[in-house]
Image (tube, helix red, strand yellow):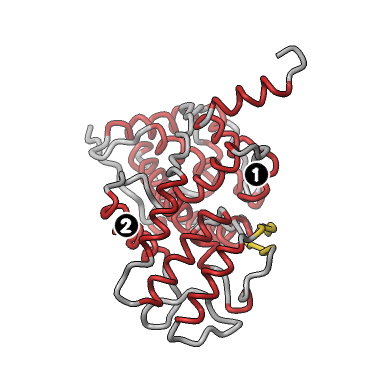
Amino acid sequence: MSGAVHQTDLTNAGGDGLAQARLDWMHWLKHERRLADHTLEAYQRDIDTFLGFLVQHRGEALTLASLPDLTASDLRAYLARRRQANNPFGDRSVARALAGIRSFFSFLDRRKGLSNTSLSFVRGPKIKPAPPRPVSSDVAFELIDLAEEVKERWVGARDTAILTLLYGCGLRISEALGLTGADFPLPSTLRILGKGQKTRLVPTLPVAREAIARYVKLCPYSIAPEGPLFVGVRGGPMRARLVQISMARLRGQLGLPESATPHALRHAFATHLLQSGGDLRSIQELLGHASLSTTQRYMEIDPAHMIAVFSKAHPRA
């Protein structure tokens, strides 16, 4: 049996509302769950591939009404096939595929009245998230300083301001680029719209406010209140890819590893706060993490800090 797994054209897979149910699910993920575009694309690809496999595996047309009859063996067979495919699934891909499939069937249960409990018996691999890989404070300063050294002064000022926000305020790239002209001049506390459309308050350092002011002063384009704060060389909205390209250039000049990404500056923000005595709950709020367990990953980077806190706080230490 070939290891290839093909996607299916749902219009030829039995119809009777299956294609529409999939579209309804994708609409729900995008507009109600507000998942990121890359996650949406991955979920869509995973569910299409799974449904395509079922047509081959069961040897019959697939319909919406037949989905409650699927068994745990059907799902295990699909995952086994993916493990053997030309581009085999690793543990993380298996976990993501299971998450997408369960989301789809949970949606069918709640919105379409089609229940299938058998698939819930399939357990995915246990994955321990890799600890964040921050840069040191010295490297963060070097990156920010070096960003200034480009031919066009305003571009250097812009990149410096963006990197300062990532390291000085712990912002994601999307959050920094989501700022508008109405956010200038930067207040001492900035309201950030983060993942899941959740807002949080982030203090801004004087150095960040100064970097933004210098960029706006040098920028050859007018920054409108309703427009983006950061613009590209043609005056349009700055794209995240440009920040990544700029960081790749900087780490090449400094001889840094590929892990020195823009997001590594956000990791550095959290790690350096923790090393300076910041508590996890406060860092969680500053980063906008939904779960404290996500923030706790920074403890793995600096176990010495955890031991120091224990030694200082425990009455018998």
The answer to whether residue 164 is visible is yes
Residue depicted at x 47% and y 52%: 39
Instruction: Give the quarter of the image for residue 106.
Output: top right
Q: Position of residue 27 (x, y in %)?
A: 56, 61
Q: Report the quarter where the N terminus lies.
A: top left
Identify which amino acid the numbered label 2 is placed on.
Leu
**Crowdedness near tag 2: few (<14), some (14–19) or many (≥20) residues, C-alpha within 10 Å:** many
- Residue lying at 50% horizontally and 45% vertically, measured from the top left: 268
What residue is disc 2 on?
250
Q: Amino acid at mark 1?
A: Gln
Q: 55 or 183, which lies in front?
A: 183
| Camera-nearest residue between 290 and 91 | 290
Which residue lies at the image location 52% right of the left edge and 30% below the top edge?
A: 302
* 155 or 95: nearer the viewer: 155
| Residue under the point 47% across and 50% down | 265
Up/down of 180 relative to 22, above or below: below
Asked if residue 25 can be seen in this view, the reply is no
Q: Give the residue at the far top of this rendering.
A: 316
**Quadrant of residue 73 within the rendered picture:** top left
Viewer-side label of 2, 1:
2
